Amino acid sequence: MSKIRIALIEDHDLTRVGIRTALLQKDEIEVVGEATNAAEGLKMLKKLHPDIAIVDIGLPDKDGIELTREVKAIIEDEDLDTKVLILTLRDNKEAVLAAFAAGADSYCMKDIKFDNLLEAVRVTYNGNAWIDPAIARIVLQQAQQNLPNPASKSSYPKYFVDSSESTEPQQSIESNSLTDRELEVLQLIVEGCSNAVIAERLYITIGTVKTHVRNILNKLCADDRTQAAVHALRSGLVE
């Protein structure tokens, strides 16, 4: 089994060492490099091509959001697959939306519990967005609001864009289209839980969880778990 290769870009020594020490407790994770500023971090990512870059927003030489934008541009140009997990103390709306608009795959607060950080790493590695519960409310609020003007739409990721721009009528989502169990699974998806955690909490197998997730995506006409969560929040299927 291949390890999850992680690079850390964090200027605070104690924080960086703490994250590294925590991650290395798991055999499935390998910390392949560390940097204390954006310039060093960008060079490191170009050289090492990690699976995940954990990036602090408050870097001394450049905002971590701008670094994320540059990293994503490089990934697209060179056909790489490095994912960016933002780790920050900033939970204000502007920072959250800007991070996702820049291409961040996941967003965690620095006071996140160790088990949740590991879960965020695994979820991000598997190609899904992990949103800290403290941030989820901001995503919900944005999903429920129309953007202030059409010109600003390009600054938001696809699942924040107002669906009114579509010429196709939006399919209504009714609560009775999902079973009670699917609603339970959907609630846990919104909370950022992986299939393994959902299985544990609901006392079902991972295979059963995958079946429920597949059915949920089909019923909500969603491409992935993040879109499903936003559709559900917008439609009031979950709280």
Image: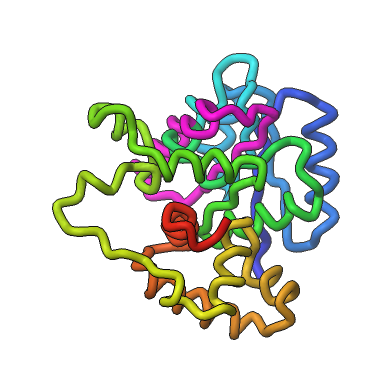
Quarter assignment of residue 89: top right
Q: Residue at x 64, y 15 (%)?
A: 60
What residue do we see at 49% from left, 63% from top? 237
> Where is residue 233 drawn, in percent x and y?
48, 54
When the figure is inspected, residue 196 is found, relative to residue 157, above or below; the finding is below
Left/right of residue 64 with respect to residue 148 in the rendered view: right
Residue at image coords 44%, 30%: 70
The answer to whether 220 appears left or right of 186 in the picture is: left
Residue 13: x, y in percent? 81, 26
In the displayed orientation, state which residue is furthest to the top.
61
Magenta stretch contains residue 60:
no
Residue 37 in percent (x, y) is at: 64, 22
Residue 220: name its quadrant: bottom left
Residue beneath the point at 79% across and 62% down: 27
Quick one: 226 or 176, which is closer to the camera? 176
Residue 23 vs residue 222, the one in the foreground: 222
The relative height of residue 239 versus residue 13 in the rendered view (above or below) is below
Q: Is residue 123 above or below residue 96?
A: below
Q: Is residue 59 left or right of residue 170?
A: right
- The image quarter in which residue 165 lies: top left
Span highlighted in magenta in the image: 69-98
